[in-house]
Amino acid sequence: MDKNAQLAAHLRPTASRPLLGLTVLVVEDSRYSCDAMRLLCLRSGARIRRADCLKSARRHLQVYRPSAVVVDLGLPDGSGADLISELTVANPRVDVIIGCSGDTFAEDVALAAGADVFLGKPVTSLAAFQNAVLSGLPPERQPSGPRLVADDPILPDPMAYRDDMAHAADVLDDRDSELSMAYVTQFLAGVARSAGDGALQKAAEELANARRDGRPTQSGLARVAALVQDRLADRMAM
């Protein structure tokens, strides 16, 4: 068997690693959520590449063609739905386009933009992740027979959550920007939901509601900023 044949055999999907040989581009601004995706890919056999904004994702896609793209809908420089729409009409098309968000309305938005499947955050099911990626692949690229899916919990690195808090703190410094405040509010609500941080999630959602209803936001913004600083100081219980 020559080296190319050996490599092809080595990268052939198996029952326990059904995504072996595939590359997944994760377009995600949260390091905590991205670390969860890293673990899902690792346990499935897939390679992972990461882009934290639309600009970075588009630059990546000019060079590489991944097997699947997982796109978060809330990104710092725009909506992930725009990237999904672009991927849908691209030629050649990425095999699998997956929309991802913790917002209840996001599934309709992602599917309307052309996503093949939607994953709600937090993504904790290995089977659901594998099914989403495999759903758009031709039969010859899928593992034969039943899959062996481990039920070990997906536990992202807590330091990745702290990195998200540092990012949010930087954005919160620009409180005069409406775009920045809209972004950081949805970012914190989504990250806190994924991490099971109920206090921060509630505060961020209440701030989002106040902004939407045109009510004063100073106290809500101060509370969110204080909670972020607490988490940076490691004074939280998750």
Image: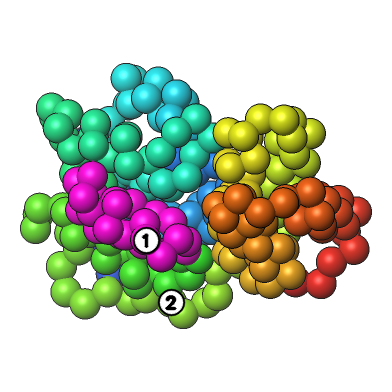
Q: Residues within 10 Å of mark 2 (few under 14, many from 20)?
A: few
Query: What is the number of callouts on the image?
Result: 2
Range shown magenta: 99-121
The residue drawn where x is 54% and y is 35% is 76
Q: Earlier in the sequence, mark 1 or mark 2?
A: 1
Whether residue 157 is visible to the viewer of this picture, yes or no, is: no
Q: Quadrant of the C terminus?
A: bottom right
Task: Name the residue carrying label 2.
Answer: 150
Q: Is 13 placed above or below 28 here? A: below
Whether residue 219 is visible to the viewer of this picture, yes or no, is: yes
Name the residue nearer the viewer: 78 or 133: 78
Give the distance between the C-alpha atoms of the residues marked 1 and 2, in whole angstroms. Answer: 30 Å
Would you say 84 lies left or right of 53 here? Answer: left
Q: Residues within 10 Å of mark 1 (few under 14, many from 20)?
A: few
Kindly indicate the quadrant of the structure image that contains residue 209.
bottom right
The residue drawn where x is 55% and y is 75% is 153
Q: Which mark is residue 105?
A: 1
Q: Secondary structure at mark 1?
A: loop
Q: State the image coordinates of residue 133 (x, y, percent, origin top left).
A: 27, 56
Would you say 163 lies left or right of 78 here? Answer: right
Q: Amino acid at mark 2?
A: Ala
Q: Is residue 230 magenta?
A: no
Q: State the image coordinates of residue 156 (x, y, percent, origin top left).
A: 62, 60
Name the residue nearer the viewer: 202 or 164: 202
Would you say 28 lies left or right of 192 here? Answer: left
Q: Secondary structure at mark 2?
A: loop
Q: Is 3 placed above or below 96 here? A: above
Toward the left, the furthest residue is: 139
Q: Amino acid at mark 1?
A: Phe
Would you say 238 lies left or right of 136 here? Answer: right
The residue drawn where x is 58% and y is 41% is 183
